[in-house]
Amino acid sequence: MNTGLRQGEILSLRWSQIDSGRRTLTILEQKNRGRDTLPLNGKAVEVLRRRAKIRHIKTDLVFYSGNGTRINDGNLRRAFYSAVRKAGIERLGFHDLRHTCFTRMVQAGVDPYTVQRPGRWKGISMVMRYAHHSPESLRGGVEAIDKVYHNFITIASNEKDR
């Protein structure tokens, strides 16, 4: 939820891809066949710091199974859905965490082009598909109308006095 990474990118993530000094990670093989270096926020850095304390001697993987191999997709999904059920959350899939990441960025007022880069999409239309506004995140936009209207009235009043 803090990186916007896809499930496969998380499961394949290796320590050699992480630069803790720069607070970045490099995606070597991704859906669009490109290579990208992405910034990490404080929450993601903290998760990686805690994870680094329990590294497995036989693997460079950040997240691994009990025997040090890549976690099986099916096992991850079973564990994820079990946790979702226990939390009482309805209709939440693993990929929804990616949507949540970019929705939070847009709701915080981050411009679409800045959201597009960590999402690694070719076009801005995918930002619109992934990120969803809430009524509160739209408030600033509609309140801007009040400011424009107030400024217009102030200017119009001052011109009458001249």
Image (cartoon, rainbow, N blue to C red):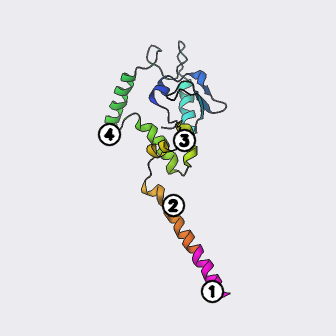
Label 3: element kind: helix
Between disc 3 and disc 4, whose residue precedes?
4
Structural distance between the alpha carbons of marks 2 and 4: 30 Å
Between disc 1 and disc 2, whose residue precedes?
2
**x, y (%) of residue 53?**
56, 23
Q: Amino acid at mark 2?
A: Gly
Between disc 3 and disc 1, whose residue precedes?
3
CB under 8 Å between callouts 1 and 2? no
User: Any magenta on residue 156?
Assistant: yes
For this rendering, which residue is in front, 109 or 57?
109
Q: Badge 3 is on which residue?
A: 116
Closer to the observer: label 1 or label 2? 1
**x, y (%) of residue 17?**
59, 24
For this rendering, which residue is in front, 129 or 50?
129
Q: Badge 4 is on which residue?
A: 91
For this rendering, which residue is in front, 124 or 72?
124
Q: Amino acid at mark 1?
A: Lys
